[in-house]
Amino acid sequence: MTGTLVLAGTPIGDPLDAPPRLAAELAAADIVAAEDTRRLRRLTQALEVTLGGRIVSYFEGNESARTPELAEALAGGARVVLVTDAGMPSVSDPGYRLVAAAVERGVRVTAVPGPSAVLTALAVSGLPVDRFCFEGFLPRKQGERLARLREAADERRTLVYFESPHRVAASLSAMAQVFGEEREAAVCRELTKTYEQVRRGPLWELTRWAAEGVRGEITLVVRGAEAAAAGEPDAAELARRVAVREEAGERRKEAIAEVAREAGVPKRQVFDAVVAHKKTPR
């Protein structure tokens, strides 16, 4: 008889947001696997819960090594509750490997729904929420970051990203390069916490604001691309796309060819747009 893996959502800020089932699951668990055992202790104190089971650490550094151990415990009948620092396990947090291992062994996997930084940020952003996609964290290196953003340049759905505070300005600047400076976005900081802040505006404005420094847990929400306008592509937009590719390390010739292919226009038209942009005073 196999056990059960419980993915338990935890508050992203205010402990009062914890779902009632969370306390019951933590108290009943044979094993509690926690991304940060110190945060777990603080959470159980806030919820006034006494843990009867074993506590093990389960974070990015030991996830691969510890997964087989926990999977064996599940196969042997244990009830394992997985919690991360905040929000739902597996969403840009440890958990996917353990879920996959449990499913492979025929172990039941369930969840305690809880607060989500992704959905909370979407709800308060003021941007369309009928269709969205979650992109997780952007790469740290500028070239890789620009390449990832280019993949989403024509995405019509609202985009949601997580970002560390010391890279917010760089990411917003890269978004302005790829998506255009006027694209609307929202920087959601410290959601549900004492110093919660939502800053909304075009990417150029948010980039300037973030240059002064941003602290706390950050979620970025960006409006999706507008439908392509009828008629010929705008020359300034063609030049901007070439510039973004050059910034990422592509040679201009290859960048022009790729932009022409994406836009469905002659390469000469893109070349002329780039030359005209270079001559335009700034």
Image (spheres, helix red, strand yellow):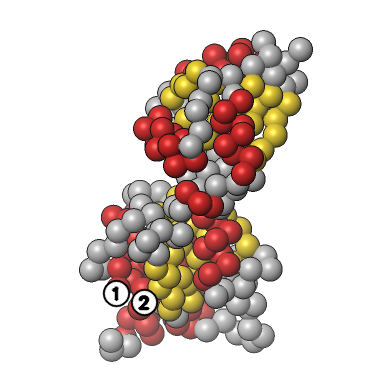
Residue 90 visible in the current orientation:
no
Q: Position of residue 228 (x, y in %)?
A: 63, 78
Q: Quadrant of residue 79?
A: top right
Circle 1 Cα neighbour tier, 10 Å, few/some/many (<14 / 14–19 / ≥20)? few
Q: Position of residue 97 (x, y in %)?
A: 57, 28
Front-lying residue, 176 or 42: 42
In the displayed structure, 103 sits above or below 84; it is: above
Real-space CA distance between mark 2 and mark 1, rounded to the nearest whole angstrom: 6 Å
In the displayed structure, 257 sits above or below 237; it is: above
- At 52% across and 84% down in the image, what residue appears? 234
- At 72% across and 22% down in the image, what residue appears? 107
Left or right? Give the position of 264 relative to 252. Answer: right
Q: Position of residue 226 (x, y in %)?
A: 60, 77
Left or right? Give the position of 50 relative to 119. Answer: left
In the displayed structure, 214 sits above or below 79; it is: below
Circle 2 Cα neighbour tier, 10 Å, few/some/many (<14 / 14–19 / ≥20)? some
- Give the quarter of the figure containing the C terminus: bottom left
- Give the quarter of the figure containing the N terminus: top right
Left or right? Give the position of 56 relative to 230. Answer: left
Q: Position of residue 136 (x, y in %)?
A: 50, 50
Furthest residue toward front: 48
Which residue carries the number 2 mark? 204
Q: Quadrant of residue 28?
A: top right
> SS class of the residue under badge 1?
helix
Residue 230 visible in the current orientation:
yes
Which residue carries the number 1 mark? 208
- At 69% across and 24% down in the image, what residue appears? 4
What residue type is disc 2 on?
Trp
